[in-house]
Image: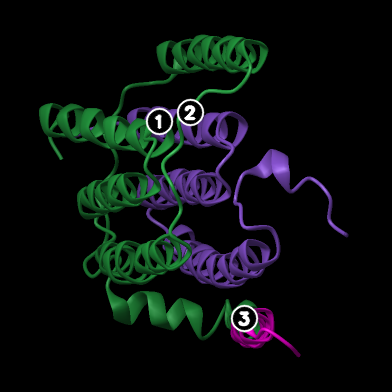
Amino acid sequence: MSPLVFVVLAALTLGAAVAVVLNRNPVYSALALVSTLALLSCFFVGLEAYLVWALQLVVYAGAIVVLFLFVIMLLNVQREESVLPAPGVVAGVGVGAGLLALGVAHAVTRAPAVAMPAVAEGYGSPAHLARRLFTDYLVPFEITSVLLLVAIVGAVVLGKRRI
Amino acid sequence: MVPLSWYLVLSAALFAIGVAGVLLRRNLIVVFMAIELMLNAVNLSFVAFARQLGAEDGQVIVFFVMAVAAAEAGVGLAIFIQLFRARETLQADQVSTLRW
């Protein structure tokens, strides 16, 4: 990924992320979230993580955000009159953002600006990832399946009016 | 080619926007979206480090993060539906009690 493309995509991504936080209407926030996630997936292509790119679009931008939109529309959430809370909280967040910017500037100016090394053929392909997933990461993978099962049961139980 | 530090800066900025969203917003659904932003920022660092090191472990971990995010969204939104039935609101400062 060339630096110019990176900077343009990063600016768009950050703009969309700010829009998620600052929009008064939750539906617009959800749409901005889709944009953020889709733009982030472009970076995954640049990093040669093609399976992660596909998963990002299908699972995140597809399934999860649709779930958000579904709940927003089901509950008919009204737009808020005022987005920002007390001035003290806003000031605290501003100070925190300033400190973060300082830390990032410090880290970047000290980091060596070397390009990333070349990777082996087939890096990030589904075959490679599946091999790692079903050998070294087999136990976490099985635990994930249990977690998803628990989440499904929990969501169904919580969604019922009376248990 | 873009060095690793650029990706990490983008990731840090995205994470900070997510934290700001959790702290600033009162609407629980928007707070949830800000949490998703933070998870995605971390995913970006995982993939960037995986690319830098030439290892695929970071990408495998992103897979797990996505599974956890999906589970979290499913259960969390079910809780919001129940909360809305009981309280008719999704403003965080109006539902500060866990029991009533």
Q: Main secondary structure of the magenta part?
A: helix
Q: CA distance from mark 3 to mark 2?
A: 29 Å
The foreground one among A134 and A44 is: A44
User: The chain coloured green carries which letter?
Assistant: A
Residue, disc 1: A22
The residue to which callout 2 is attached is A83
Query: Label 3 sits on what residue type?
Result: Gly
Could you say which disc has been placed on residue B70 in the image? none
- Magenta range: A145-163
- The type of residue carrying mark 1 is Leu
Left or right position of A72 against B73:
left
Q: Earlier in the sequence, mark 2 or mark 1?
A: 1
Quarter of the picture containing the C terminus of chain A is bottom right
Mark 3 lies on residue: A159
Q: Nearer the viewer, mark 2 or mark 1?
A: 2
Residue A95 higher or lower than B9, as above or below: above
Q: Is residue A149 left or right of residue B65?
A: right
Q: Quadrant of residue B54?
A: bottom left
Indicate how the structure is coloured in the image: by chain
Badge 2 marks a residue whose secondary structure is loop
Assess whether residue A155 is covered by the magenta stretch: yes
The answer to whether A152 is drawn above or below residue A85 in the figure is below
Up/down of A48 relative to B81, above or below: above
Report how far apart the C-alphas of labels 3 and 1 lie in the structure. Answer: 29 Å
- Quick one: which chain is purple? B
Quadrant of the image occupied by residue B22: top right
Give the residue drawn at x 49%, y 79%.
A133
Chain of the residue displaying label 2: A
